[in-house]
């Protein structure tokens, strides 16, 4: 069964545009105008077929940093699939500069991506590697957000290796974490200690970023169907930013057409009037929570080669 195509109005609304951003409008228009390019993949037993969109992989996510690894629910729409493939350095210079040959290749003529197909938290989610910097790469995202990198950690983030850091150096992050990962004394606090899905990669927690208030931060920071990870047991304000807890809950298709278009019926629902979110929170480490971006920027197609 094919998923419903979102209306142009629904997709544009889902993009949560600020000030008439023409880039995001163009992206949504590409997706709306291209239904003929989709094809069907094999669905899990008892689940509706999920379209494999020709928006996958999409243009670079707004805040992507070359070498960053992102998690997607359903259709992979941002970056290159993390499947261990070999890439030419000549056409992937930013990525080669970020990750080198730590995952394979000679680092001069070719490089390899990490193969994370067996490392996803739940079935039918997928990892992708950002192959270049996005238009808003200088943004770190949200305070308390946990991001995964195969390259160097950007300024404003801290390696999530359980280290103790000074409150005086990271007062905003200290306010967010509230000692939930431990404190050595009143002058220090600990960050989460998270094992990466593969050697050569590391998680980082955002120390300098936007505070996740209701509606105060644009969803231009994230993409529709992207999975966000936070260093908190439940980030209540992320709902105001368009995040849905990744706890297997069921959503209405008609109220979430853009998200359904990308997630499909892989995680449950009847595929016509309802669909489910992945249940990643059931396997999340203590005091860590996952959210699927419900709104955000709808992905654009990559130009044909």
Image (cartoon, rainbow, N blue to C red):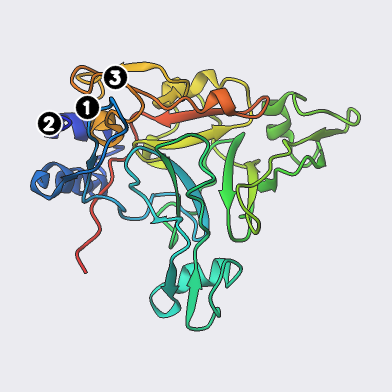
Residue toward you, 296 or 175: 296
Q: Vertically, is 226 above or below 64?
A: above
Q: Residue furthest bottom?
A: 108
**Residue 34 makes an appearance in the image:** yes
Name which quarter of the figure residue 8 lies in: top left
Q: Is residue 230 left or right of residue 49?
A: right
Element under disc 1: helix
Question: Any mark on residue 7, and which?
Answer: 2
Task: Report crowding for label 2: few under 14, some 14 to 19, many 20 or more residues within 10 A (C-alpha).
Answer: few
CB of mark 1 within 8 Å of CB of mark 2? yes
Q: Vertically, is 214 above or below 90?
A: above
Q: State the image coordinates of residue 124 (x, y, percent, origin top left).
A: 39, 37
Q: State the image coordinates of residue 134 (x, y, percent, origin top left).
A: 41, 56
Q: CA distance from mark 2 to mark 3?
A: 21 Å
Q: Is residue 234 left or right of residue 189?
A: left
Question: Any mark on residue 269, and which?
Answer: 3
Name which quarter of the figure residue 151 lies in: bottom right
Say which label, 2 or 3, has the lower sequence index. 2
**Residue 215 makes an appearance in the image:** no
Query: In the image, what residue occupies the spot 57% across and 44% down?
Result: 147
Say which label, 1 or 2, has the lower sequence index. 2
Q: Nearer the viewer, mark 3 or mark 1?
A: 3
Q: Is residue 12 left or right of residue 152?
A: left
Q: Vertically, is 183 above or below 146?
A: above
Question: Any mark on residue 257, and which?
Answer: 1
Task: Report crowding for label 3: few under 14, some 14 to 19, many 20 or more residues within 10 A (C-alpha).
Answer: many
Q: State the image coordinates of residue 276 (x, y, percent, origin top left).
A: 35, 22
Q: CA distance from mark 1 to mark 2?
A: 8 Å
Say which label, 3 or 1, has the lower sequence index. 1
């Amino acid at each position: 069964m094919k998923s419903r195509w979102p209306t142009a109005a629904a997709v544009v609304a889902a993009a949560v545009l600020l000030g008439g951003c023409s880039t995001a409008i163009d992206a949504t228009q590409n997706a709306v105008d291209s239904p003929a390019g989709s094809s069907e993949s094999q669905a899990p037993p008892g689940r509706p077929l999920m379209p494999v969109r020709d928006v996958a992989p999409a243009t670079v996510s707004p805040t992507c940093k070359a070498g960053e690894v992102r998690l997607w629910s359903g259709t992979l729409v941002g970056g290159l699939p993390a499947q261990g493939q070999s890439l030419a350095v000549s056409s992937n210079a930013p990525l080669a500069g970020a990750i080198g040959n730590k995952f394979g290749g000679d680092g001069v003529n070719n490089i390899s991506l990490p193969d994370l197909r067996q490392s996803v938290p739940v079935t039918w989610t997928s990892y992708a590697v950002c192959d270049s910097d996005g238009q808003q790469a200088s943004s770190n995202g949200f305070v308390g957000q946990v991001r995964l990198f195969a390259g160097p950690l950007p300024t404003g983030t801290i390696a999530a290796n359980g280290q103790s850091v000074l409150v005086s150096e990271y007062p905003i992050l200290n306010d967010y974490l509230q000692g939930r990962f431990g404190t050595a004394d009143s002058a220090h606090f600990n960050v989460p200690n998270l094992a990466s899905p593969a050697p050569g990669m590391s998680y980082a927690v955002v120390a300098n970023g936007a505070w996740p208030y209701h509606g105060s931060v644009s969803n231009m920071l994230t993409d529709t169907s992207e999975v966000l990870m936070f260093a908190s047991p439940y980030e209540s304000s992320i709902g105001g930013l368009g995040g849905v807890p990744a706890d297997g809950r069921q959503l209405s298709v008609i109220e979430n057409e853009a998200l359904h278009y990308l997630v499909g019926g892989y995680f449950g629902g009847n595929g016509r009037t309802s669909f489910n979110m992945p249940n990643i929170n059931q396997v999340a480490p203590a005091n860590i929570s996952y959210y699927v971006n419900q709104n955000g920027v709808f992905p654009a197609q990559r130009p044909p080669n």
